[in-house]
Amino acid sequence: MRSSARDPRWLAYLSQSDAQMGFFSMWYLIFKSLLSGLIIMAVSEIAKRSPAFGAFVASLPLVSLLAIIWLWRETGDTARIADHAEATFWYVLPSLPMFLALPLMLRSGVSFWLALAVSCALTAALYLITIVIAARFGVRL
């Protein structure tokens, strides 16, 4: 929970009725969904014009940063945020080969949907391998 010393508006939020808090929670979820959708739409529109710049924008950790900000806003739990950021690092590593396998298959004549499915399966397998290997080194994912 947040302390009132850090955010004095928190006390006003606590005094609202449950119905009002539910109403604001729903709008907050809608806002988060719209913002996430806008980011995805922007990346796809940019990529139509410049695949390299679209890839650059997509590679920015915008989703992770938004998730961290929202996690902080909703919980104020720095330990949870630290765990999330560290786990994100470990999960990014096994996802990287997908971005080499997909173009390789597409350029080799594999159909789009098959190449995408194989790339996703490869990533899932690499996630599982990463979880097992990380556990051997004391990293819990």
Image (tube, rainbow, N blue to C red):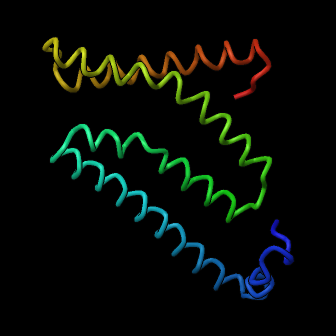
Q: Position of residue 83 (x, y in %)?
A: 73, 40
- Image: 120 above or below 54: above
Q: Position of residue 77 (x, y in %)?
A: 78, 55
- Image: 59 above or below 22: above
The residue shown at (74%, 84%) is 9
Q: Quadrant of residue 10?
A: bottom right
Q: Position of residue 38 (x, y in %)?
A: 35, 60
The residue shown at (77%, 77%) is 7
The residue shown at (49%, 45%) is 61
Work out which quarter of the rendered image holds the C terminus and state it.
Answer: top right
Which is more toward the observer, 41 or 25? 41
Task: Count the numbered circles shown.
Answer: 0
Left or right of residue 67, residue 133 in this image:
right
Q: Quadrant of residue 69?
A: bottom right
Q: Position of residue 85 (x, y in %)?
A: 65, 41
Work out which quarter of the rendered image holds the N terminus and state it.
Answer: bottom right
Left or right of residue 75, residue 93 in this image:
left
The residue shown at (49%, 64%) is 32
